[in-house]
Image: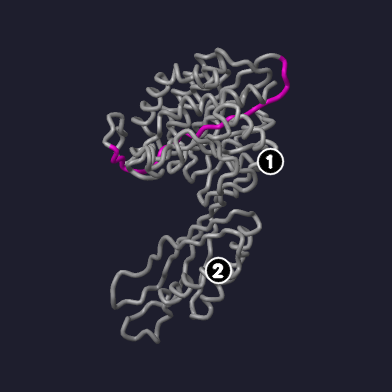
Amino acid sequence: MHKHLENLVSIADEFTEIRRDIHQHPELGYQELRTSELVAKQLRGWGYQVTTGLGGTGVVGQLKKGTGTKRIGIRADMDALPIEEATGLPYASAHSGVMHACGHDGHTAMLLAAAKYLAQSGEYNGTLNLIFQPAEEGLGGAKKMMDDGLFEKFPCDAIFAMHNMPGITQGQLVFKDGPFMASSQNVTITIDGVGGHGAIPHLAADPVVAGSAIVMALQSIVSRNTPPLEMSVITVGAFQAGQANNVIPQRAVLKLSVRALSREVHAMLKKRISELVHAQAQSYGVSATVDFVSGYPVLVNTKEETDFARAVGCELVGEENIDLNGAPLTGSEDFAFMLEQVPGCYLLIGNGDESTGGHGACMVHNSNYDFNDHNISIGAAYWVLLAERFLV
């Protein structure tokens, strides 16, 4: 066992308690007041220079050692989800309708454990920037921290982040250079027609029929406009129109989730959605507006930093416990914004699979999910070794 892993196993209980305390007191995006206060207090106690308020509730702990000029950033997210917890665990959420269903409590605990070890025993030469980010869950907390001057105030030569993943063997590390997570954009299509009586449809312009045609036509973008070896998803998650069976409504609204694994495909999807919606609407005698809500870009890991991150993983746990080239994910992650500005790598740590059972194998964003506490020592040891190997 690597010495860092052995040492962090010995202090894991302290950070398991912290993780479970955060789990019991979850906070939604930009409301992480208790969590950020807890993080800031711990960092100050270990000698970090602490800055609060970036991105609203974000925290950055900086610790310099030696005279080295290199600077590394390591990021953990802190926010919970609007989900009612159903785990029945003794440390289950005390807040109705709010739950750490994605493991951000564990990500925070891993980075805090690494922070303590690096402050007290870390052997590095340079600047360590530990970034505790709010509002990852669809609210763009990473971008908000950047808009508040994150990388101007805390310049980084490279940045790194880690996310747990159920369905993968507990503690296994997964790496991939290039596009790793999809872009995500929400789109609202509003179709305005002419309402009327259901018995005399020829005197109306039916937005429901037009909307139905648009739903089906949108799938042709995926099947006929996207290159066959590329990935794209257009999901119509909501179709809202009318209330009565004998009334043709005035308006229909479609709500879409649009995803891609390349910036070029993402741009094509936006163009074709707009073209197709307006053409379909015109053919049915209605009008339509398309509102593209700002979303998350494709998460792209840079090769040099990912190769470095892989090597650190192999040193820590051995190549047999590493997936050197994992499959890309269709989920999205706002760490992508940071990677657009600074080179770096986003990696996964297995939360457990069906062979281990329990809450660790339950998928994220599920009311029965729980972070696997056995990952605290592995994740923290990885951050320690990564920082020491980078800051030489």
The residue that disc 2 covers is 223
Q: Is residue 373 left or right of residue 322?
A: left
Which quadrant is the C terminus positioned in?
top right
Q: Position of residue 7 (x, y in %)?
A: 50, 16
In the image, residue 70 lies in the stretch drawn in magenta: yes
Q: Earlier in the sequence, mark 2 or mark 1?
A: 2
Say what amino acid the circle numbered 2 marks. Ser
Question: Can see residue 25?
Answer: yes
Q: Residues within 10 Å of mark 2 (few under 14, many from 20)?
A: few
Q: What's the magenta bit mostly, secondary-structure-wise?
A: loop
Numbered range of the magenta stretch = 67-87
Residue 13, picture quadrant: top left
* Farthest-out residue, front: 320
Question: Can see residue 143?
Answer: no
Q: Secondary structure at mark 2?
A: helix
Q: Position of residue 285 (x, y in %)?
A: 49, 80
Q: Position of residue 4 (x, y in %)?
A: 54, 19
The residue that disc 1 covers is 303
- From what the image shows, is residue 10 above or below residue 308? above
